[in-house]
Amino acid sequence: MTSYRTSFIFLIPLLVASGLSGCGTTVERLEVDEVRDLSGEWNDTDSRLVSEEMIDDVLSRAWLRESRASRGQRPAVIVGEVRNLSHEHINTNTFVADMERALINSGEVEFVASSVERQEIREERADQELHAREDTRKEMGQELGADFMLKGTINTIVDQSGKQAIKYYQVDLTLISLADNRKVWVGQKKVKKLVKRGALRL
Amino acid sequence: MRASGVNDLKKRPWSPRKALILDVSFIAAIVVAISGCATYSGSFGDIEAYLIQDQPQQALAELEQRRRFSRDEVLYLLNRAMLLRMDGAYGDSNEALEGAKKLIEKREAFSITEQTTSLVVNEALRSFIGEDFERALIHLYAALNYLQLGQPFEARVEALQVDVLLRRLEDKNSKNPRVYTEDALCRYISAMIFEELGEWSDAMIAYRKAYEAYTKYAKSYGTGIPIFLHADLLRLSSRQGLREEFKRYEQEFPETVWLSVEELQNVGELVFILHGGLAPIKRSHETRVIDPGSGRLISIALPSYEVRPNPIARVRVTVAGRSENAVVVEDVSAIARQTLEVAMPAITARAIGRTVIKDQLARRAAKENGALSGFIVNLAGALTEVADTRSWVTLPSNIYMARIPLQPGDYTVRVDVIDVRGHRLKQFEFENVNINRRQKTYVEKHWLSPAV
């Protein structure tokens, strides 16, 4: 009798290890602002928090008022590169897009298409030269030149010991005047996480 | 078998016949469960044959067709990533490597069921998470893939990740000098990435770490310090104004000809990397003896590396009328062998422990249910005793590198692979290799000699 028991003790982990405990895929829909950290890596919540904070900051600073006062019109901004200098493969496009949307919708600034987008539009304009009706054709050389470029970096410091790691992210965004290279606004957002990796699993 | 009376039958819910059926099903379950891992390294021949014929697509198709267990998923992803990059699918290769990284992180946690199983059945039933050196090489290949894709900042992420991993290994294993805790080539590629991005300080630190690691490699694995590292150390220490360090390198490498940062920025650079041969493959060596006292079968299985011969003695790169030898920058075979050597005492101890446990189970089965039951449990234990032969078998045996500064332009690069007798084993020609000012152009080739 005991040997069957020992046999089954033997067998149970084997069956589990053989993947018999596997389950089907389940999907649960979440609110986009719900915080759910899975791996401890940079995620949608970090992206959203950074963009929200940066937008509030950039729209409340003196550069905007001064620029409008000196030019008499809304400043034109272009998004440059946000460099990922972190330990993770972070997609910076999401919070750059969030910032772009909030800035355009605020009505306080004009936004110029990025260099990749401009290239595509120029190709379309060149195509119009050949194929579009004259009264609908858009002329070359009428683009709006940007006054400021938004650039930035994401940096991280990782401190780890055993199964624990502290991840410190710092996002720096800078608005630079294209006329004279002046930095007119610097935004910074820090995110700090303590990530504990599981010591045990089934 | 013990005679049983009516009372005995009442006490025991299962008859000896049922017991026999259960034991037989138990063996069947175990044999089915381990059938994949028992022959893992043995069944790799077809994939190897395609690689020798330089047909990575067919090798990949073969890999995809193979039945695989959830516990071997990391291994599958690593081999998939390697075959994809051999085929030039660098983006897909990185997708597989990222998948492997995530899975390793999850499976690093101690698994109660897997540990119990490996304690009583065999170690091949644990989830494969790779040896430390294999995990560092994931970052190396991911970085090389990003460099091939023209994404130096993503390659930089891999350089930072491998630094985190190597620091962790250093903290964990600092006591035994034979334990792998540092990877010279990972440090060296990291330094090249930082330098190309103009991050001089990080580049200097990484070159320095590469130098320290290669010094250790020379003793541990017989890999010399690459000649171009001398030039890198002189260039960067000079650029950073590290006078004492620069003087020290000048004394250490008096004959090194080197270009300053400014001179190197006026030209481009060809970085040729040959991934030669295949890393050694693990085999299971089983010893089965019958204990004369009890008549029980005692089985013990241990892994050992079977070295796959790598006939490459020299790799000569010729471009624009200039020839340079590519040097060994990573001897993966030597690292793998030493890693197993270091792990062998623990593997042997666990195997002996497992034999004792299996013998105890057979003894109890015989005592409580008769000799036939004991024999069946004993046989099951012996049959399931196989060594864990899993390893990242598509890794190369050696990695060779040449760095050649060139004026911007398009070039044809010729590579001759030469054996010890000076005979040419293979010649490759890469046409229209574009060299740009201030940039490194990476040209890579995986090559297996038909003699493997």
Image (cartoon, coloured by chain):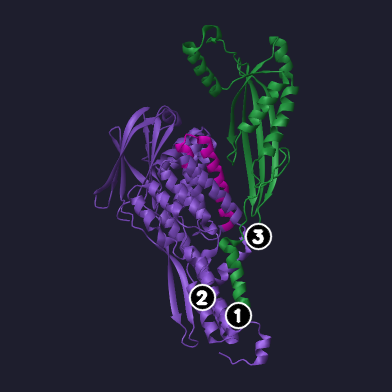
Using the numbered discs, state the Cα–Cα distance from disc 3 to disc 1 in whole angstroms.
Answer: 29 Å
* Residue A74 placement, left or right of B363: right
In the rendered image, the vertical position of residue A22 relative to residue A99, given as above or below: below
Chain B palette colour? purple
Label number found at residue B380:
2
Pointer 3 and pointer 1 on the same chain: yes
For residue B114, say whether it is visible: no
Q: Position of residue B31 (x, y in %)?
A: 50, 70
Q: Position of residue A14 (x, y in %)?
A: 58, 67
Secondary structure at badge 3 equals strand
The amino acid pointed to by label 2 is Ala
Quarter of image, res A93: top right
Q: Circle 3 marks a residue in which chain? A: A
Q: Which residue is mark 3?
A: A200
* Residue B416 placement, left or right of B135: left
Dominant secondary structure, magenta: helix
Secondary structure at badge 2 equals helix
In the rendered image, the vertical position of residue A83 relative to residue B64, given as above or below: above
The quadrant of the picture occupied by the C terminus of chain B is bottom left
For residue B22, say whether it is visible: yes
